[in-house]
Image (tube, grey):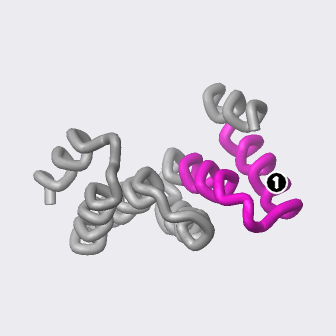
Amino acid sequence: MMLRFALRKLNKCQEAIECYDKAISINPKYDKAWYNKGYVLHQLQKYNDAISCYDQALSININPLRLQRKADSLFELGKKSEAKQLYLSALEKGSNDKNYIQKQLSKL
């Protein structure tokens, strides 16, 4: 996983995506690979693709950060109602990033 993080940090996004795809092909239930692929896709402004990856990660393991990241992608697509629901769900599930979520909610 460290190589994928390093590639992402170096803005080698396509290479990072390829690493995540390889990990997913080996273990389709590897939720962290789905999540991290979604994160990179979001950075590339491929929001619909990011949402699909976040959905896969969430179907395996629901956690507040994943809900928040999916909400971020929905927000960027102008799907504010859906984003709001997910931000609120992230708060309910104990998000550690309450200030950020409150800031995002104030924009909706």
**Amino acid identity at mark 1:** Ala
Q: Position of residue 107 (x, y in %)?
A: 14, 53
| 42 left or right, relative to 91 | right
Instruction: Determine which quarter of the picture holds residue 73.
Output: bottom left
Identify which residue, 65 or 9, lies in the foreground: 65
Q: Which residue: 57% across, 56% down?
A: 38
Magenta segment boundaries in residue numbering: 12-41
Q: Position of residue 102 (x, y in %)?
A: 17, 48
Q: Position of residue 82 (x, y in %)?
A: 29, 73
Q: Which residue: 11% across, 52% down?
A: 106
Instruction: Determine which quarter of the picture holds residue 81.
Output: bottom left
Q: Which residue: 85% across, 54% down?
A: 22
Q: Relative to 18, is 1 above or below?
A: above
Circle 1 is placed at which residue position? 23
Callout 1: SS? helix
Asked whether residue 8 appears in the rendered view, the answer is yes
Q: Which residue: 33% across, 52% down?
A: 94
Q: Relative to 59, is 1 above or below?
A: above
Identify which residue, 70 or 76, lies in the foreground: 70
| 2 left or right, relative to 83 | right
Q: Is residue 60 magenta?
A: no
For the C terminus, the image quarter is bottom left
Asked whether residue 76 appears in the rendered view, the answer is no
Q: Relative to 1, is 35 above or below?
A: below
| 27 left or right, relative to 59 | right
Count of labels shown? 1
Q: Residue furthest right?
A: 26
Q: Is residue 13 magenta?
A: yes
Instruction: Determine which quarter of the picture holds residue 28.
Output: bottom right
Q: Position of residue 6 (x, y in %)?
A: 70, 28
Q: Main secondary structure of the magenta part?
A: helix
